[in-house]
Image (cartoon, grey):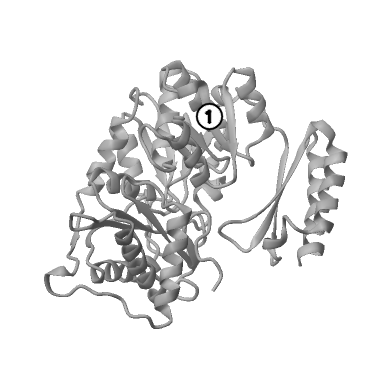
Amino acid sequence: MGRLFGTDGVRGVANADLTAELALGLSVAAAHVLAEAGTFEGHRPTAVVGRDPRASGEFLEAAVVAGLASAGVDVLRVGVLPTPAVAHLTGALGADLGVMLSASHNAMPDNGIKFFARGGHKLADELEDRIESVYAEHRTGAPWDRPTGAGVGRVRDYLEGTEQYIAHLVGALPNRLDGLKIVLDEAHGAAARVSPEAFTRAGAEVVTIGAAPDGLNINDGCGSTHLDLLKTAVVEHGAHLGIAHDGDADRCLAVDHTGEEVDGDQILAVLALALRERSALRSDTVVATVMSNLGFKLAMEREGIHLVQTAVGDRYVLEEMKEHGYALGGEQSGHVIVLDHATTGDGTLTGLLLAARVAQTGRTLRELASVMARLPQVLVNVPDVDKGRVSTSAELATAVSEAERELGGTGRVLLRPSGTEPLVRVMVEAADIEQARAVAGRLADAVKSALG
C-alpha cells in the first residue's frame, strides 16, 4: 500500500479508490492514534464532521461517523459546509478532531478525507503516518479494542454551526461592503449557502452563479478552476468584482470589473498591503510557496515586505506561519490563510477581505491588483509518469539545467510532483510568453521521456 495521505488529505475516486471501508478504517485509526497521543485524556472525545455536496459524500460521511462512534468518539454532524468552516468549528467548539469529506477542486467522481486536530489545524505529518500505519495493521486482521455500552460514541446533527460560521466571517471584516455589487461563483459546492449570506450581511449587493448544488454538478464548468462564466457575469451585471470558490471553498480567485482574472498572488499582494496599513502584518512578512510568480516577489521587495517561500501546499505555508507568528500566507491557486481569523485557507473570508479593501479604498480591484506585474508563466501537467523520480532522474536534471541557462536571470523553472494527482507539474516563467511556452514544452517532453 502506497502512502495514502497527500499534501491535502486522502483523495481518490469515490467507491473505487476511496471506499466506505477505507473511510471507516481511517476514522477508527485516527481515533485510536489521537487517543494514544493523549488528545482525549481526561474527557469524552468529540469530533466535528462535515462534507461538500458530492453524492459520494453521503455514504462516506456515514462511514466516517460510524467509525468514529464505534471508537468511542461523540460526533457533531454539521452537514454541507466549507472545509474552513469545519476547521473553525473544530476549534470554536473545543472538539478533539475535525473531519472534512471533499476533493476540493477535483471533478465530482473524486472525494477525499481531511482530518483536523484540536484547534482546527491540520494534522502533523507524523500523525498522518501513524494513522496509516495503524490502519494498515488492522486492515490485515488485528482486532480493534472496541468500547461497548455507554462507551460508544453518540451522534447528533449540529445545524447551528452554519450560523456560527457566517457570524464569524462577517465579524472578521475591518469595514462593510456597502455600495459594492459582487458576483459570486460558488462552484455548486460547499459554500453555496454560506458565502452569499455572508456577503449580503456585510452590505454587498450579491449576484450568484454556480449556487445550486445537486450532488453531481460540483466544479462542473464553474468555480475557481473555470472562470469564464464569472468573467462574463461580472461584465454583464456591471459588478465591481467577482469571487470564485472551489468545491470546498478553501480557495478564492477573483475577477475585476473588466472581466480580468486576479490570481492568488495578486490577492496576497493586495491583502498584504491592507494588513500592513492596519499594523496587522506581523514582521512585515508574507508567506508563499515556490510556485508564486516572480512578479509577486519583486512587488513585495519594492513595497518593503519580506517574502518567505515554502514547499507547495497550504499545510507548509501554515506551518511556517505558525512557527514564526506570521499573519498572512497563501498560494497562487487562491489558498489564502489569514491566521488571525482562520487556521486554513478560507475562500469566503479571503473574498470578503478583498472586497473590503475595494470598499475601504474606493479604488477598483484592477487598480489594487496592479501593485504587481505578473511575469508570463506557463504550467504544464504531465500525467501518467513516475512522479516519485522527479528529484533523482539525471536525464531530467540535465534538461532543467539547460532550460535555466537559456532563461538566465529573466525567468525560472520548477518541476514538482503533484501531491494530490498522479502527475508532474512543469512551471516556467520568462519575460516573454512564447519563450516560456517553448521551454515548458521541451521540459514536458523531457519529463515524459525520463519518467514515462
Circle 1 residue: 286
Which quadrant holds residue 179?
top left
Residue 79 x %, y %: 28, 58
Q: Tell me which residue sits at (29%, 60%) in the image.
A: 35
| Furthest-left residue in this view | 150
- Seen in the picture, residue 312 relative to 180 is either above or below; the reply is below
Q: Tell me which residue sits at (41%, 42%) in the image.
A: 346
Quarter of the picture holding the N terminus: bottom right
Which quadrant holds residue 444?
bottom right
Q: Tell me which residue sits at (18%, 58%) in the image.
A: 44
Which quadrant holds residue 450?
bottom right
Residue 238 visible in the current orientation: no
43 or 368: nearer the viewer: 43
- Seen in the picture, residue 322 relative to 154 is either above or below; the reply is above
**Does 365 sit left or right of 410 as displayed?**
left
Callout 1: helix, strand or loop? strand
Quarter of the picture holding the C terminus: bottom right
- Amino acid type, mark 1: Val
371 or 153: nearer the viewer: 153
Residue 188 visible in the current orientation: yes
